[in-house]
Image: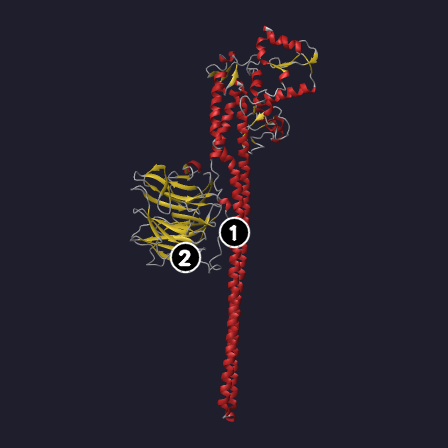
Amino acid sequence: MASASPLKDIDEQYLQCCICMEQLKEPKILPCLHRYCRECLERIVKKGAKKIECVTCREVHTLPKGGINGLKTDFNTKNIIEFIQLQDSVKVDPLRTCIHCEKKQEASAFCFRCKDFLCKTCHEFHASSPMFEDHHPHIFSLSEAEAANLTIQKLSSLKVAPRCQTHPEKLSELCCTTCGNLPICIPCTYGEHQGHILKEVKSLAKIQREMLKGKIADLLQYKEKAYNMQVEIKETKDKLELNVDQESQKLQEQLDREGEQIKKEIHDAEKESNTKQADLEERMKEETSGRKKELEKEMRELRERYEQACREEQQEAYLNFRKIKEKNNEEKKQLEEGLRVMNNEIQELLASIRTQKDENVKKIKELSDHFEGIVKRFENVTATADCILAAQNDWTDVQCIPDVCRAVDLLREEVKRDSPGMGNLSGVKNRGLSAGVAGREKVGISEGVESIVDLHIEEGMSIRDITGNEDGTIVITGLTSASQRYIAVITMGGSLQQRNILPGTGLIIIRCSFLSQYLIAVICGGNQIGIYDIRDQSQRFIRLSDVIMNCPTNQQVRCVTTDPVNGHIIVSCDSRDVYVFNSKLEHVKTMKLPHVIKRAGDIAMHDGNLFVCDSSRTSRAFAVALKQTASEVKYEFTKPTLGGADWYPHSVCTDQNGYIYMLWWRGGGRYVIVQYTKDGGQIELEREVDRTHYVIAITAVQTKQGEKLLLPTWGTYKLLTYGLT
């Protein structure tokens, strides 16, 4: 809205209260810049309430001491409404009592200084008499009221300066910036405002307008992002529907495939049983016939022997028949039971997918409402700023612009902020069938290393951790040659795509884990935890002691994992303490690991279970079920069977199918990758790593060629890749 914008171009909704849906009366403005009638706000806010929720954008604000009356009046909007009401009143009844001659006749003008109407004769006198010289700029001819080119700036120029709050009989002449740009009169300068910073309104208003223009220009850079969020949310919802259909279809196809296989096995077993039975009967007939011929010569003498032999043959045949039938029935029963169990588990998985979908749809709705509120705030903030800048009213500007600037700053920061977990909301977790049910569909590990690539990083840099996501993005953390902590994005070919320095220096633990498609949770020495965004390479860190009450001052973070489904970051320390944070780095809860675990060296989260590599001398690994504030051991992982029992758990991860992979090590630089069943009950596969490589960690990442296991090496800057087949 330019300064020359006609008054008639103002959107009626801008002047409408969203509560009563009528034109604003005594408009009170909230910090988000949405405005409502004073009486409407008093109706919806309970007496004594400390907070108020904006009806339009749902932002929650703290009420000032005076409650609703303590909220600022929107003078700019109030001026426009008063003028519109003036126009409307003249249209309804042009006959008015003149303030000078006191005759009731058609009004010709309105004096904003006198705050009343003038007839034609008095209008001419009022506008030409030196006696009313200070009124001249504030006289408005009603003949201009319907002019198409009547601008907000013209209307603003008619208004008089506000009166001093301390001395209401005097007009304000200066602004006290110490008291929030409060309009004051000259006597106040040597009274209660003596020693305060005082500004001439015209120069201050000019500075404020330039500041607002700059902030609006900065805010407009994020306009596309604010408006595109709704598009992204719709795409996320559509993708969620597609993923749910695909996962459901995948489970149904698996059920159909396994069901057909089981039915075939039942049919084959029955066919085999019938064949064996027929063969046995035929053989018995042949044997009986042959025996009969041999014994006919001695029929008389051996009749009893013959009858006994026949009885024995028949009894043996009957027993064989019964054994075959019982075996066949038992196999059929087991297969049918397996099919029933599989069907029940798949129904449970489908129900889980539907539940996840409902939860994600709810979260998407919340995000949609949130960003719809942001768009409304964006439109309101820019419209308010345009209207104020168009008015060019110095007194209104110095009082309103600081509030508008604060609202612009808050909105800009909110639009800039990422919405963690958006990518996760489009997917659902399908843990797959349990090992006992889905034993026919297993994931294997390539016999040897598929590839070894050089990592093209700065010489002297060390790698401390690695993480990957379902999009194939790989992130590493470590130390530079100058002992600075870094985070970097690399390709499968080892090329460096980006690298940034993290807070602090020194040889200390630096771990990372993907929280969403673009956000990585990082622990960075001491007791620091943060989030790194690979899109704009921004980072934010906090200290445990800053957000957790009674956190030990010497508490050191050791490892980190994430629960993308719930948007949680799980941090384990050098004690048994486990801290859970949300995507805003707000502390959610604190838990204790079971006593059997002394100190976590690495952790991974999957399907509600926390997998823990104990780095103490116990050299054990556990699956832990997390409760609200406590935890319990579900099972202990079996140690590798290769070459003795002195193996130590070093790193752990899971693949998309729910299989668990643990990297174990022992003296002499020996490492072995162990694949465990989805429930961790047993070892599926073991792959010993070439002894020439000292590997740091293990992670699973999706590539165009399928899912892979990645292992970075210590000192030699290599990346080992194992295929999952």
Label 2: state its secondary structure.
loop
Count residues near mark 2 (Cα–Cα under 10 Å), then give few for <14, some for 14-19, many for 20+.
Answer: few
Residue holding disc 2: 444
User: Which residue of the protein is positioned furthest toward the top in this rendering?
Assistant: 130
**Which residue appears at 46% of the width and 15% of the height?**
195
**Which residue appears at 58% of the width and 16% of the height?**
158
Label 1: state its secondary structure.
helix
Q: Nearer the viewer, residue 449 or 17?
A: 449
Please indicate, yes or no, whether residue 166 appears anywhere in the rendered image: yes
Q: Pinpoint residue 263: horizontal percent, then vertical percent.
A: 53, 65
Please indicate, yes or no, whether residue 619 appears anywhere in the rendered image: no
In the displayed structure image, the side of residue 689 where residue 152 appears, left or right: right
Q: Is residue 443 above or below residue 179?
A: below
Q: Of marks 2 and 1, which one's residue comes earlier in the chain? A: 1
Q: CA distance from mark 2 to mark 1?
A: 23 Å
Q: Is residue 613 above or below residue 60?
A: below
Q: Nearer the viewer, residue 226 or 346?
A: 226
Nearer the observer, disc 2 or disc 1?
A: 1
